[in-house]
Amino acid sequence: MKFGIFYEHQIPRPWGAESERELLQNSLSQIELADRIGFDYAWCVEHHFLEEYSHCSAPEVFLGAASQRTERIRLGHGVIQLTTNQPHRVAEKVATLDLLSNGRVEFGMGEGAGPAELHPFSIRVRDKRDRWEEAVKAIIPMFTESSWEFHGEYYDFPARNVVPKPYQKPHPPLWVACSNIQTIAKAGEWGLGALGFTFVSPEAATAWVNRYYNELLHNANRLADYPPNPNIAMVSGFMCAETDEEAIEKAAGWTFFIFALSYYGRKGVDAPGAGNLWEEYQEWRQTDKAREALIGGLIGSPETIRRKLRQYREAHVDQVILLNQAGKTSHKDICESLQLFAEEVMPEFHGEEEAHQAWKAGVLDGSIQLEELDTQPYDIFSHQNEDIVRLTPEQLKAQMAAKDAARAAEAD
């Protein structure tokens, strides 16, 4: 299993004159640390107008800076909004970053969110999937063709040679955002890496991993001429500390992430510049939903996190992407959490990567057959789970242990 870190660039109110500058500089320092201590990926979103939730509207600039402060960590667009970007500019930005990073780019592609983001770009929400698919078809040949033209419903342009070309050949690995879990099946069909949230359970992870590979192998429908990127990555709330209680105490940022994500999905944008998400979050953070969120994430001591990760390893998830730059989590807590995880947790799973790649090779060449499992009972990501109870931090730890013991009993 490989590990990434994830950036929305959250910055709850109140803001000061230095808030955004400090956020970006701290994030670069965290990626620099992650590079030194062995993390595999750093992922960065693209969002527009989503105050407090995400101030990451120019990820190519941020990742360009990160490329000059790191040596080995791969730099992921998780994702570029193809709907709000002109196709030629997407290809140009991805190729330039790939050259600057000496071939360390991962190219994730997404549709954008709802009206809050799309309407200012004169994009209708109802068109975003069709527009996204057409953009993929328009963009990918730009990486290799010296003369490329396209004539579609949404994009129509004459032949040009898009320069520069990427360092990786034919282009960086391709991924798609799977904010809707059903898109995992489409990602397999398209031959794209799947970027999604934490599954509701290890059983759900197994079912969806099997579904993904079976779609990739038996129902292939590439959108363009590109090599497949068979990978499943899941984003999870994260905080690693010496004890479960300490980690839970420091992980409030993850609950703000979930609240803000739900808020913009439910209400859209308030009057620009006039809202206060952090203030509205204060009541919600004491609810059952907020407490349950702390159970679902990778939040706890090294042993607790190892135990959870082993369950996803058994499901053959390729990568776990850790999100702890969220809410008002401090730079110090983020760095200490990454360091402890790298020292106490990551070596076990990095050490098993060779065996995982052998399993994947067997799946792809047909020597390992994956059972067709029913994904319908698991048609949800865990951060959307609303079946919750009110718990204290001590009760949270007890519930984590109870869930693990129940699974162990079932296995016996």
Image: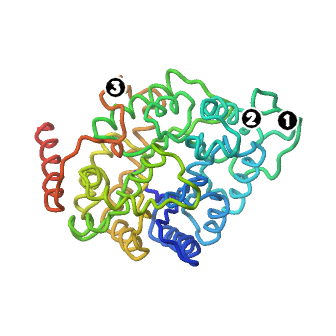
Element type where label 2 sits in the image: helix
Distance, label 3 to label 2, CA atoms, is 33 Å
| Residue ID at (76%, 26%) | 153
- Would residue 89 appear left or right of 313 to someone viewing this image? right
Name the residue beneath numbered marker 3.
Answer: 376
Q: Which amino acid does label 3 sit on?
A: Gln
Are the residues tagged 2 and 1 within 8 Å (C-beta)?
yes
- Position of residue 295 measured from the top left corner of the image (x, y, whole percent): 25, 52
Name the residue beneath numbered marker 1.
Answer: 157
Q: Is residue 212 above or below residue 237?
A: above
Pointer 3 or 2: first along the chain = 2
Distance, label 1 to label 3, CA atoms, is 41 Å
Q: Which amino acid does label 2 sit on?
A: Ala
- Position of residue 286 measured from the top left corner of the image (x, y, whole percent): 26, 58
Q: In this view, does 130 lie above or below 358?
A: above
- Position of residue 110 measured from the top left corner of the image (x, y, whole percent): 59, 42
Element type where label 3 sits in the image: helix
Label 1 crowding class (10 Å Cα cut-off): few <14, some 14-19, many 20+? few
Whether residue 353 can be seen here: yes
| Residue ID at (68%, 44%) | 84
**Residue in front for this viewpoint, 281 or 47:** 281
Name the colouring of the figure.
Answer: rainbow
Which marked residue is nearer to the observer: mark 2 or mark 1? 1
Q: In this view, does 48 lie above or below 225?
A: below
Name the residue beneath numbered marker 2.
Answer: 138
| Residue ID at (65%, 42%) | 119
**Residue in front for this viewpoint, 393 or 226:** 393
Name the disc covering residue 116, or none. Answer: none
- Would residue 354 appear left or right of 216 to someone viewing this image? left
- Position of residue 7 measured from the top left corner of the image (x, y, whole percent): 50, 59
